[in-house]
Image: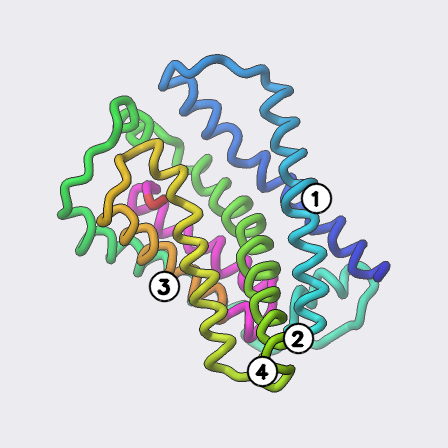
């Protein structure tokens, strides 16, 4: 239990950094849209509070669920805080990096070839935001918030809990079934895609095309990171998700 609490504290700190990393883009967007001014301390305080209230419980429950159903969980994080020193598979992070880059490229290509031909107009003001948004600010937010925070929530927590639920309902043997584990990865990826719609709705009107786009594009990296999570653990999934943002930012950084 102590090891899990230490790991949760480390993951929560990383999520705080992730939440803070997206604030420059949020502040810039609010300024360009002439939104009511919010004191800086309130924005930064909310980011820290969100990490403590949302990501800390998700990290702890994800670690517990992963252990209960035989998943790797977060092996390196647990090792760093005094847990069992498990060996790291050779080339695991190289494969995770390749999958991340390839996944990001697949998202951009799918968007260009399938969805950008559809008539989806941005709400007034957002064209200028996307045109002037900093490449490095977007990449930093993608690396930290996307790579760490979203992986804590969607893979370490959600995939682990779904597989744990399978083990509770159908037995431990069912939870070790590759098809059922893959189904959990797909379910988490779809939820990941739907979770982007509130932000998307501030930019465009939600319709069938927009919902399909969110599910397909985010589903690509959600499934890729999920499979890496099952095979190598949380840290490799973080690398996969984080590096997918390189081609996304090069492609315009507008995938939400």
Q: In the rendered image, which quarter is residue 7 located in?
A: bottom right
The answer to which of 249 and 30 lies nearer the viewer is: 30
The answer to which of 57 and 238 lies nearer the viewer is: 57
Q: Work out how far the residue at label 2 is from the one at label 4, CA to CA, in angstroms.
A: 8 Å
Which residue does the numbered mark 3 point to in the structure image? 102
Residue 205 in the magenta stretch? The answer is no
Range of magenta residues: 228-254
Q: In the rendered view, how is the structure colored?
A: rainbow
Which residue does the numbered mark 1 point to in the structure image? 13
Q: Work out how far the residue at label 1 is from the one at label 3, CA to CA, in angstroms.
A: 29 Å
Q: Work out how far the residue at label 1 is from the one at label 2, CA to CA, in angstroms.
A: 26 Å
Lower sequence index among marks 2 and 3: 2
Which residue does the numbered mark 4 point to in the structure image? 176
Image quarter (top left, top right, bottom left or bottom right) of the N terminus? bottom right
Image quarter (top left, top right, bottom left or bottom right) of the C terminus? top left
- Provide residue 234's location: percent of width, then percent of height: 60, 63
Query: Please, is residue 172 above or below residue 163 in the view?
Result: below
Compared across the picture, whether 194 is left or right of 62 comes to: left
Residue 248 in the magenta stretch? The answer is yes
Lower sequence index among marks 1 and 2: 1
Q: Work out how far the residue at label 2 is from the one at label 3, CA to CA, in angstroms.
A: 30 Å
Q: Which one is closest to the eye, mark 1 or mark 3?
A: 1
- Provide residue 120's location: percent of width, then percent of height: 19, 39
């Amino acid at each position: 239990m102590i090891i899990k609490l230490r790991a949760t504290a480390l993951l929560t700190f990383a999520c705080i950094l992730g939440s803070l990393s997206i604030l420059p883009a949020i502040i810039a967007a609010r300024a360009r849209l002439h939104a009511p001014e919010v004191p800086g301390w309130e924005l930064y305080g909310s980011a820290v509070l969100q990490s403590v209230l949302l990501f800390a419980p998700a990290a702890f429950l994800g670690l517990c669920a992963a252990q209960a159903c035989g998943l790797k969980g977060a092996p390196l994080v647990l090792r760093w805080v005094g847990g069992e020193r498990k060996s790291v598979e050779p080339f695991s992070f190289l494969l995770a990096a390749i999958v991340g880059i390839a996944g990001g490229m697949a998202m951009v290509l799918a968007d260009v070839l399938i969805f950008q031909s559809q008539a989806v107009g941005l709400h007034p003001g957002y064209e200028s935001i996307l045109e002037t948004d900093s490449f490095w600010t977007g990449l930093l937010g993608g690396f930290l918030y996307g790579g760490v925070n979203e992986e804590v929530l969607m893979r370490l927590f959600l995939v682990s809990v779904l597989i744990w639920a399978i083990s509770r309902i159908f037995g431990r043997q069912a939870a070790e079934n590759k098809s059922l584990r893959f189904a959990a990865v797909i379910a988490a990826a779809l939820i990941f895609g739907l979770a982007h719609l509130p932000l998307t709705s501030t930019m465009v009107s939600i319709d069938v095309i927009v919902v399909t786009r969110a599910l397909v594009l985010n589903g690509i990296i959600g499934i890729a990171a999920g499979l890496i999570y099952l095979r190598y653990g949380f840290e490799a999934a973080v690398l996969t998700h984080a590096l997918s943002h390189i081609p996304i930012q090069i492609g315009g950084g507008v995938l939400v």
